[in-house]
Amino acid sequence: MAILIKGGEVVSADKSYRADVYCNNGIIEAIGENLDVPAGTEVIDAGDLLVMPGGIDPHTHMQLPFMGTVASEDFFTGTSAGAAGGTTSIIDFVIPNPQQPLMDAYHQWMEWAEKSATDYGFHVAVTWWDESVYEDMGKLVHDHGVNSFKHFMAYKNAIMAEDETLINSFTRCLELGAMPTVHAENGDLVYHLQRKILERGITGPEGHPLSRPSEVEGEAANRAIRIAQALNVPLYCVHVSCEEALHAITDARNNGQRVYGEVLAGHLEIDDSVYQNENWEYAAAHVMSPPFRPKKHQDALWKGLQSGNLQTTATDHCCFCADQKAMGKDDFSKIPNGTAGVEDRMSVLWDAGVTTGKLTPNEFVAVTSTNTAKIFNMYPRKGAIEVGADADIVIWDPKGTRTISAKTHHQNIDFNIFEGRTVTGIAVHTLSQGKVVWTEGDLRTVKGAGKYVKRPAYSSAFEAVNKMRIHNEPKAVKRS
């Protein structure tokens, strides 16, 4: 059915203006004042509301098998919860086990994702290396529209990628026009610190941040950046949580290196005091990696977002309920790592960013949608209110309020890290593929309605980088 969004203020990453937006067959077909539309068109009165591109969460883990259990959120419940908060697309992660073929893992995740309610794509993790990984990376880029590959520098003895794997995979990414991404934590150092802290008799959740201090992240971020610099390949750093990692990114960008940084809504707004809570379940519910940091890091991260040295916001949405967290009751290193947030990211960022003056509405659109679409080559199909773009739209009430609670959220988890927070700025209506999936508290998502979004490689841009690299390489010296 065709829909006319009438009278709202269109807010994009670069401009704001008053206009009607006409959507038909899942596409934005017209934008303008007093549009003449066919009879029978559904009309949504946007009144004093804002009309923005639907949010894109570039970092989720739906249904993830991890640390001896499986995340409680599946692709239907997770994308539905996202729609309730104004998020219309996610980029999830295919994470092969060590020695598992990448294509096997990709097909498994695609099967799980068939139930998605809104659109989705995948990063694919490289957790090991041989010639078959090299070949599968090519198939994923050329045949399946994957243009980004994840590398865990953490989780020793599980999915951690050694430096040699990073070098091989980064080099292959450059050849393919794909973006390497990293979870930057020194896995060897984390493993060492975990053992030391447990030997001291610290077994509760308070041991988690002690085993993963900010230096652990800063070192790994700098190492990944320097490897990327040597290979002349761009790099995307996920869930940047501390000053040290931000400084490494900022320094690299100031020197002309193409490095991108992602920050989580949780890391911007929650500090490490949560791990000192006397309630074990409360503290364990906040166990994620990297952990929540002291407040000084939050101030730095906000400045990184404001300055443009951090470009995207995400959630690392990975849900584990209390009974799953209890697997680490006697050993913090066995608490499944993950928290929720896909439903709350947009409102928390508007409340903490726009209402405080840290971000403009246009900057909000950039960091919640447009920048992700551009970095991962989905723009302007996604992340834009433009004729021809997908009709993934959130109609936003900048003055509307709601109180976040596990009792009322749509996420399939028994805890909410933003519990009790009243936020200003809410999604009133959410459109996915031109269909209303959330309207004034009524969730209307349909299982399986989401579509897989292929993301083309950055072939031309990467070819230019390659030509520059080759041009600048020294020539062999002829000697008699």
Image (cartoon, rainbow, N blue to C red):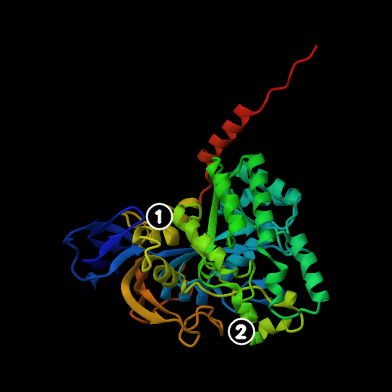
Q: Nearer the viewer, mark 2 or mark 1?
A: 2
Q: Residue at x 76, y 61 (%)?
A: 189
Q: Amino acid at mark 1?
A: Arg
Looking at the picture, tell me which residue is in the foreground, 453 or 7: 7
Provide the secondary structure element on which disc 2 rests.
helix
Left or right of 466 on screen, residue 201: right
Q: Earlier in the sequence, mark 2 or mark 1?
A: 2
Q: Which mark is residue 282?
A: 2
Q: Quadrant of the N terminus?
A: bottom left
Q: Which mark is residue 381?
A: 1
Image position, residue 407 (x, y; %):
48, 88
Q: Amino acid at mark 2?
A: Tyr
Q: Residue at x 58, y 65 (%)?
A: 110
Taking the image as drawn, is residue 121 in sight?
no
Image position, residue 134 (x, y; %):
70, 48
Q: CA distance from mark 2 to mark 1?
A: 40 Å
Left or right of 91 on screen, residue 277: right
